[in-house]
Amino acid sequence: MVSSASSTGAASAARGARRTERLLNLVIALSATRRWLTKEQIRAAVPQYADCATTVAFERMFERDKEDLRELGVPLETGGEDPLFGDEAGYRIDRDAYALPEINFTPAELAVLSLASRVWQQASLAGPATRALVKLRSLGVEPDESSLVGLEPRVRTSEPAFDPLYAATRDRAPVSFDYRRAGGEAATRHVEPWAIVSWHGRWYLVGHDRDRHAPRVFRLSRVSSAVKRIGRPGSYEVPADLDPREVVAGTVGERTTRRARLLVRPGSALAVRRRAVSTAPAAVPPDRAPDDAPDDVVEVDVADVEVSADELAGYGDAVVVLDPPDLRDAVLRRLRGAAGLGTGPGPTDRGGAR
């Protein structure tokens, strides 16, 4: 009896997941263009509709999904390019009605959103959503992908291995790649990817190493070849009690940190201010007007100079590194490189462009 109930629950959960994915793909298709899409275009663009064996089955599913979207508050419109000539009815989502109203955030909330935006942006739409856009193009409908912001999380990272490994963890597909150990030669590894984790500014893959028959942690920056799939999706299970951050922490360990002193312009670098150990007004320079708000001296703990330099250089002249010298030099290298000044002495020794 317990086994039967468990199987029923699993089947119900699977149906719910398929329905959610289908509705998301339908929203993506209808939001990707300002043109009216006919039923046949929608059926071709949404993978689950294309799998319907008959037109009647598709019609029933599409009618249910339209009602579901309207109940969810999605402004689904019905119309056509030229109703006077009896064109076939089309469908689209009213972008203006679907857009969020203007929202105001506190400085603390903006700091959190700023951190989040550094992670969830600029990756390709995954799986069936991508196929929906490709099919729309094949039907002569040019999608506007900028309208899809917020429909699916996106990830931005400089690691070439991130995208294929992220997709492999999503699909539960085993992979192989060449991996270079610290101070050692590269060797081919065969892995069942479980999860990808960001830890102290670096990306790590947690998975089962088939060659060593044990869980292992791999730093993505040390993957030295293309990632290849070596098995079918869904061919292994991820441990139900897996805590990937705990695994990485136990393998990589905590890094020693140093204290950095930064000169930060008022109202800027909110993410840095949020993790500050201390903040105090800086002395006002003689050339600054008396009523100007002074910069702040912000102290933060730094674990990795290069990772921290990437972040601080992104603030431009809003942040100046006072010390330590190696962090200041790393930021200057990046700023001079961006300005095309090379690596020699720059026009200022203050660690910024101010």
Image (cartoon, rainbow, N blue to C red):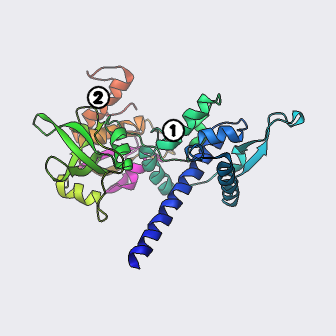
Q: Amino acid at mark 1?
A: Thr
Residue 32 seen by the camera: yes
Seen in the picture, residue 292 relative to 336 is either above or below; the reply is: below
**Distance between mark 2 and mark 1 Cα atoms:** 38 Å
Q: Amino acid at mark 2?
A: Arg
Left or right relative to 330: residue 2: right
Quadrant containing the C terminus is: top left
Is label 2 in a helix, a strand or a loop?
helix
Above or below, 71 relative to 51: below
Any mark on residue 333, and which? 2
Q: Is residue 199 visible?
A: no
Q: Position of residue 184 (x, y in %)?
A: 10, 36
Quadrant of the drawing holding the N terminus: bottom left
Q: Is residue 49 left or right of residue 94?
A: left
Check the image and name the residue furthest to the front.
54
Q: If you read the primary sequence from the N terminus, does the residue marked by circle 2 or circle 1 appear first?
A: 1
Give above or below for 112 relative to 231.
below
- Secondary structure category for the residue under label 1: helix
Residue indicated by mark 1: 130
**Magenta stretch in the rendered image:** 259-285
Residue 296, image x and y in percent? Answer: 39, 48
**Tag in front: 2 or 1:** 1
